[in-house]
Amino acid sequence: MFSTHAAGGVVVDPRGHVVVVSQRSRTWSLPKGHVEDGESVLGAARREIHEECGLADLDLVQELGSFSRMAVRRGLPEYKTITLFLFRSPTAPLAPLDPANPEARWVPAAEVPDLLSHPADGRFFREQALPLIGGAAR
């Protein structure tokens, strides 16, 4: 088993819609990814959002916290810790730069927990992000 750290964000537009991304055209996730050596967690979150959605105009609202989950990567068990931040962004066309995540969408916040493919992601979103989204959308 090995451990990794990922960072990403819940990006909210003025309508209260949230960005979700397709991973390899099979699953849906919040934009997030691996924290590179020497990179800050917040810097990694901003980079991943830009790569997976094409958004660079991000206003940090707050850190939402971290959660951990088990996964399988390259046939090995992976213990992944994920740190998410809440960002505001103007509604903008989404233009993913990462070919592994070819699609991004703005989705009403209430629909996000059921759309996310990993149950731990949906739980975290429902408990930590959803209660704050009304205020973040302004």
Image (cartoon, rainbow, N blue to C red):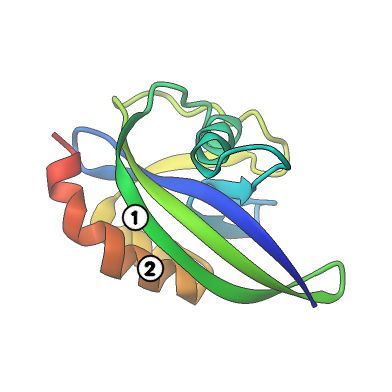
Q: Residue furthest right?
A: 75
Where residue 37 sits in the image (x, y, percent)?
73, 42
Question: For mark 1, does the 10 Å Cα neighbourhood hold few (<14), some (14 to 19), or many (20 or more) residues?
Answer: some
| On screen, residue 35 above or below 124 | above
Image-quadrant location for residue 88: top left
Q: Determine the residue positioned at 50% across, 47% down.
A: 8
Closest to the observer, 29 or 70: 70
Closest to the observer, 75 or 107: 75
The residue that mark 2 highlights is 124
Q: Mark 1 to mark 2: distance in Å?
A: 9 Å
- 14 with respect to 83 (left or right): left
- 80 with respect to 138 (left or right): right
Asked whether the beta carbons under mark 1 and mark 2 sit within 8 Å of each other, the answer is yes
At mark 1, the secondary structure is: strand
Q: Earlier in the sequence, mark 1 or mark 2?
A: 1
The residue that mark 1 highlights is 64
The answer to whether any part of residue 20 appears in the image is: no
The amino acid at mark 1 is Leu
> Residue 3's mark?
none
Question: For mark 2, does the 10 Å Cα neighbourhood hold few (<14), some (14 to 19), or many (20 or more) residues?
Answer: some
Image-quadrant location for residue 16: top left
The amino acid at mark 2 is Phe
At mark 2, the secondary structure is: helix
The answer to whether any part of residue 135 appears in the image is: yes
In which quadrant will I find the N terminus? Answer: bottom right
- 109 with respect to 46 (left or right): left
| On screen, residue 132 above or below 57 | below
Q: Determine the residue positioned at 43% across, 46% down.
A: 9
Where residue 14 sits in the image (x, y, percent)?
20, 33
Q: Determine the residue positioned at 59% across, 60% down.
A: 27
